[in-house]
Amino acid sequence: MTTPAGSGAGFGSVSWWGLSPALDLQAESPPMAPDSQANTEHGTPELDVLLLGSVDGRHLLRTLAQAALWSPRKFHFYVLENNLEAVARHILFFSLALEDPEKMGLQERSEVFLEVWGNALLRPSVAAFVRAQAERLARLVPEPDRLAEQLPWLSLGALKFRERDALEAVFRFWAGGEKGPETFPMSRLWDMRLRHYLGSRYDARRGVSDWDLHMKLHDRGARVIHTREFRRWRDTGVAFELRDSSAYQLPNRTLASGRLLSHHGERVAARGYWGDIATGPFVAFGIETDDESLLRTSNGQPVKTAGEITQHNVTELFRAMATWGHPSAAPGDPDEVPGEVNGTPEPAPSPGSFTVHFLPLGSTQTLHHRSCYKGRFQLLYVACGMVHLLSPELGACVAPGGRLIVELARYLVDVRQEQLQGFCDRVGELARAAGFAPQPGTGPSESFARFYKCEDSAPIDAAVDSGILHAETLAPPPELLVPPPEATNSPSEDLAQPLQGQIPLSEPLQLPSESQASLEALAPPTGSQTPKPESLPGPSEIMTSPIS
């Protein structure tokens, strides 16, 4: 069973890191008018940004880190994800970025971020930090008053009550509410994903990874990714090896996600890993940098690896972010001060100068019904995995003259060149149907497509009533814009365990013969009965423990 190129199976059905470099959203937003959106109380202009599928908060962090280069502004980031585990990771990353420098130094914060963000396995000290933070956040989520007091930048008011309960459950799982080594055996799950993805090429996986790196990622601009680090990540899931390799033993629970499966006519909740196993977390912070010396080459080869550039960029980002969390402590710490003007430290931004609002899952098509969102946002960002949600209803939430940025699929190694062009064409069609036009004066970019909201675009309600929006303009996007076959057209057999309190499965499900040997350690098959093919995920979607 050989996975053909262009299948998209390596992308997975859940995104844990971005597949494009981090952006300064303030540089992408429309020019600020002197009297536009002034806050009457503070006299500070506001910037409202809606982000679909940003998954790791990299654009938000870079925007805040670059805020000193712009006029003072109050930020409102509205984040919409398709799973609560991504929301929980957002909160964890921001809590880490805003951690008190007296409790955790700059280098330690940077290293912890890199390991939690991009590694499948963690060092014991980092795993202990995740557990401690998860316990704290699990206590804060159900108590809005304490949450507003300790995390004033976070707003969960728009989430439904059941979503807040599920978010608390995610933090409880991270905190180790379910004990035991088999709760989330990440190494085994990673290997099974890899076996299913590569099929008959599994024994030649090193050659496959070298081909994907040199013939795809390098050709598309990511030349700083080194063969050794990419091969290590493909084999083990460890992208950033900041210590000895033997130190990475504990599973990274933040990469676990839950799904509802159908087994013998019953809906069963289970947990597993369905993230990226093809491209890796090197693109977001590791292929571009403000320090051009890190990108120089010697004898045609980059002198720095993507991992080293990522560590530098994240360290500088956290250095600039320190004053947002603790402005009073920054002037006394020379390592944490962003800069000085005439020998005087720059005034630190107020911690209340930005707010991250999390919106309910699946609310993209209903936001325009609420007057507080209609025509509100100056900037809309859409990740490549959520392009199919770009619609006239969503476009109605963008103010006239506002900007749209769409992440392209440039760094998806499963996507052929002709498919990339088809993806770009489809993005243009969806953007035009939503009332946007290509942004003039912008240079060509293979990572992002940029548009602006037409001033004379018809309101969505009037367009629907008059029949302007035909079925073909609202048709679902092509195969590249929907979840990969791994998540939709799956093989007929798999293994899963039910949610606590449900009726246990009478027998484990069997895998196809190609992957059977790799799963004998989990549960040998005991029967011949199998559910219907369309009701089960593929071998890469192995669930290991019931969700609490």
Image (spheres, rainbow, N blue to C red):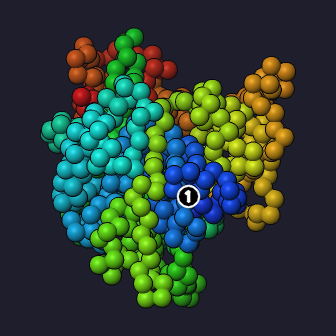
Decide if residue 465 is on the left or right side of residue 137.
right
Q: Residue at x 63, y 51 (%)?
A: 37
Q: Residue furthest top?
A: 265
Q: Which sits in the foreground, 337 or 395?
A: 337
Residue 346 in picture, x, y percent from top left: 44, 77
**In the displayed structure, does residue 304 sit left or right of residue 89?**
right
Density class for disc 1 (Cα within 10 Å; few <14, some 14-19, many ≥20) is some
| Camera-nearest residue between 286 and 396 | 396
Nearest the camera: 42 or 275? 42
Where in the figure is residue 28, as x and y percent of width and height?
Answer: 65, 59
User: In the picture, residue 295 is in which quadrant?
Assistant: bottom right
Measured from the top left, where is residue 336 in percent x and y? 35, 75
Instruction: Evaluate whether residue 151 shows in this view.
Output: yes
* Picture layout, residue 459 above or below residue 59: above
Q: Is residue 229 above or below residue 144?
A: below
Residue 514 shows in the view: no
- Horizontally, residue 123 falls left or right of residue 70, namely left
Amino acid type at mark 1 = Thr
Badge 1 element: loop
Horizontal relation, residue 521 to residue 269: left or right: left
Q: Which residue position holds label 1?
A: 44
- In front: 344, or 76? 344
Which residue is rendered at x = 24% and y = 28% of the image? Answer: 548
Quadrant of res 440: bottom right
Residue under the point 33% across and 44% down: 148
Quick check: 63 above or below 268? below
Q: Position of residue 161 (x, y in %)?
A: 37, 26
State the residue lying farthest toward the front: 41
